[in-house]
Amino acid sequence: MKNAMNTIVITLSVIVGFAFWWFVMGAPANFKDGAMRHEPLPGNILGTIHTGGPLVALLMAFILIAITFVIERFLALAKANGKEAMPAFIKKLHNLLESGDISGALDACNKQRGSLANIVRAGLEKYETVKDNDRLDPEKKMLEIKRAIDEATNLETPLLEKNLVMLSTIASIATMVGLLGTTLGMIRAFAALGAGGTVSAQSLSIGISEALYNTAGGLIGAVICIVFYNFFTTKVDNFTYIIDETILSTTEILTVKVKK
């Protein structure tokens, strides 16, 4: 499902990028020579960017993909955080556990939802299952509880890091595609200079435009991805630290209760 959604996002972004480049930026009304699309009208930004070539469309697709995954990460991390602020939820949870109100703690987790609440709830549910089992000694009971917590953690943690690799990949690819467009544009510009005779200002400007707009597109895509990749990585690291601290304190409280 994850790979299917990523494929859909990438495919739609590429289609939209190329459609915008060809039908909007490349509209004949933006050019002096109409459908030839070689000489943009003076001051016409859309037509001028269109002369950057097909790689501009690809770079726009990369920017759309990056923006889509940035929005997806914001929504996913907000959902993982739960309904209530994390510090308030953790404080409430600890108070309930220390007072021995396991049912209240489970209700709090069900209301909070989010990654941390799901992990703690798995441990508390396992505690409720094994606490009255006379065939298990306290150590084995805690092993069962920790196993349930570890399983829940292994399910929740990948969701926090999902699609971050896409942002880092797009940052690298966008830079390389922008560099390729720059190189092709400069080749076209120097080819116009080396053709002999009178240099065509139109051919020269098209080559320079292709070089500069591809450079700009590549840098914009890379900057968006790098900034938000670092932002989300830091946020996930902090989230993981909070989860580890809460799990540790929860297991310590449950260990005392199991041994009673």
Image: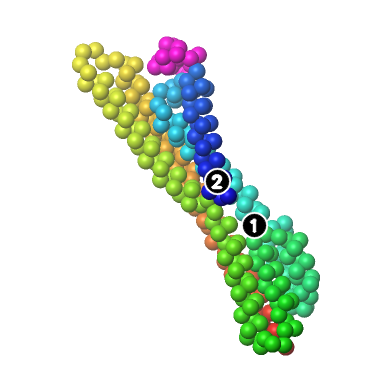
Q: Residues within 10 Å of mark 2 (few under 14, many from 20)?
A: few
Q: Residues within 10 Å of mark 1 (few under 14, many from 20)?
A: many
Residue sitting at 68 percent across and 69 percent down?
A: 122
Q: Amino acid at mark 2?
A: Ala
Residue sitting at 33 percent across and 28 percent down?
A: 185
Q: How is the image coloured?
A: rainbow
Which residue position holds label 1? 80
Q: Is residue 257 magenta?
A: no
Residue sitting at 52 percent across and 56 percent down?
A: 233
Query: Given the current orientation, which residue lies at the most extreme top position?
Result: 33
Whichever of callouts 1 and 2 sits on the residue coming sooner in the sequence is: 2
- Asked if labels 2 and 1 touch by Cβ distance under 8 angstroms, the answer is no
Residue sitting at 62 percent across and 54 percent down?
A: 77
Q: Position of residue 58 (x, y in %)?
A: 44, 34
Q: Amino acid at mark 1?
A: Ala
Boundaries of the magenta span: 28-45
Point out the image quarter for the C terminus: bottom right
- Cα–Cα gap, marks 1 and 2: 22 Å
Q: Which mark is residue 4?
A: 2
Q: Position of residue 114 (x, y in %)?
A: 67, 59
- Name the secondary structure under disc 1: helix
Q: Quadrant of residue 136?
A: bottom right
